[in-house]
Amino acid sequence: MKDKSPFLVSLADVSRSTGKMLSKGAFSELHTGASPTLAELTEALHFALGDGRIWLNDQRMVLMQSQVLGRLRQEIIDAFGIDLARGIFMRVGYMQGVRDAELILKRFPNQDLTHALAAGPRVHTLEGFVKVETKQFEFDSDKGSYFGEFYWYDSSEAAEHIAHHGLASEPVCWMQTGYPSGYTSTLFGRPVIFREIECSGVGASRCYVVGQNAEEWGEDAPERAYLGLEWPRSRQGKRSSPASHQDAEVSRDVSDRRAGGDPVVGVSASFLRARLMVEKVADTEATVLLVGESGVGKELFSQQLHRLSNRADKPFVAVNCAAIPETLVEAELFGVEKGAFTGAVASRPGYFERAAGGTLFLDEIASLAYAAQGKLLRALQQRVIERVGGSKSIAADVRVIAASNVDLAEEVRAGRFRQDLYFRLCVFPIFIPPLRERRDDIPLLVDHFLRLFRERHRRKVIGLTRRAMNALLDYDFPGNIRELQNLIERGVIFAEPGGFIDLQHMFTGNEPLGVSHPSLTRDGRLAFPSEAALPQKADPPDLSSASSQLKSAEIDLYRQALSSHGGNVSAAARSLGLSRAKLEYRLRKHGLFGQV
């Protein structure tokens, strides 16, 4: 008896049978009812009756009438205007998409990327905002490309906009557009922007949305600013020219500063709060104090503040106060006249003069000696300086931005920092959040660093594996963005040309991964337990133990590859994306060569 239905093989089956993660995929290749189905997703929804809680897997949810959300939308539009309201709701939708992508990764960890992307419209539908129908999507990880088309029916957001404002002249499903942008960007590991082409809020029978790589929309796409992929343009319309980068005391030259990420991007709530404060104070003359842990990007924020200021066409001078010897602070900051002391064979300006008309960034301000703090205070109060050995007063027309990676208020209480200088600097304090508090920004930062270091080191790596990205999302980053930058640069260097960056390419410096006991899934991925499942530890993690676990997981991966291919080293190497010579070397290194 013949089966009338065509023979269909799911992408997950292909992935498991070949031992490879598929780098390409399309919605058309999925069979009807591909997992996770809407029914399977519904099983993750739990009502704790009488307890006041609703859970979608491990995420707490709330029931809210669509009309209440519509009223909130109306209030925000009336208070802030259409443009700001659009950005707010788009970012809220983006956050919702990020959270749901994390839910899929936790609930269905063995699904390939195609199935995981296909689950997004189902979760979106399950949550009641809109009914989503997938027209098509396709991606190619090798090329880093994504394109998708979707239909939305019965959009609650469009209905509420019509109820309060009537038919609109342009698409109004802002939160719903942000949702797939956040969901897809998180899973794909690269920024993907969705745009509403047709909208029922404008009078169409249903909404039609298109998603593609952020750069495909062009540099002037407004979604880039709404989602935090770029900052507003400088008020002067041009960037500053950093001054005196030939001096060793200037913290970094222009190329080094831009290596950390130009521009500063992010979509997390904590990042956007800091960004808003920068935008608020940029066009004033107020002194700004940037506070945050080492490596969070305080100098990059100061550069952005300068670009947005009225001084953008004047010099930006960055000074690492910790690098100036105590005996030379006055000379370096205020300049020297010829003959002022032994070795002063010529007059030279200090940092205040070099930054004339522009911005002076004083990094690690807490490292200044107590006596030097008094001299700096006078310059800030009087707005004039005198060179060492000179008698002429020089106007100090500079905008000062200070930065500290320690609590200056605590330093004042400890007697190590002058209280009067603290209050002079702390006119407009801005807290720059650590990376562990802005994990939603990690995919965007990873994409930026990948493009940067692929070009710099001339390495054609494709991107990160899913397990590598998951590890980054779970890591605490004691070194913050600087450490993430180092991990990606290391991965670009270690990974094979044309291959993917995996765990063993990045975490090679005894980074504190924690006691996570990774396990190997059927399709060859390392699966890490959720943070909630980890035992509570009072002591810091054992670095040697974490390294040992990673080595053990690597050995298990090689053993499974050999077993799956009957001991054929060449076939096992192909399944792992390695050359036979490289796999044989690693097998011999671990004493596995000749084993099945």
Image: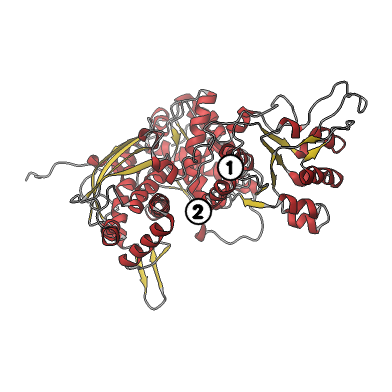
Residue picked out by circle 2: 269
Residue in view at x 86 percent, y 27 percent: 337
Q: Where residue 31 appears, x then y in whole percent?
A: 21, 45
Q: Amino acid at mark 1?
A: Ile
Farthest residue to the bottom: give it.
50
Q: Which mark is residue 270?
A: none
Residue picked out by circle 1: 481
Local crowd size for mark 2, using a 10 Å CA cut-off: few (<14), some (14–19), many (≥20): some
Return the residue nearer the eye: 506 or 290.
290
CA gap between label 2 and label 1 equals 17 Å
Asked if residue 68 is positioned above or below residue 327 in the image, the reply reads: below
Local crowd size for mark 1, using a 10 Å CA cut-off: few (<14), some (14–19), many (≥20): many
Whether residue 535 sits left or right of residue 154 in the image: it is right
Return the residue nearer the eye: 148 or 340.
340
Farthest residue to the top: give it.
345
Q: Amino acid at mark 2?
A: Ala
Task: Of the two numbered discs 2 and 1 on the same chain, state the one appearing first in sequence.
Answer: 2
Q: Where residue 124 appears, x then y in whole percent?
A: 31, 55
Quadrant for residue 66, please give it. bottom left
Return the residue nearer the eye: 572 or 440.
440
Residue in view at x 81 percent, y 57 percent: 414
Q: Where residue 19 appears, x then y in whole percent?
A: 37, 38
Q: Quadrant of the C terminus?
A: top left
Whether residue 126 sits left or right of residue 394 in the image: it is left
Mark 2–mark 1 CB contact (< 8 Å): no
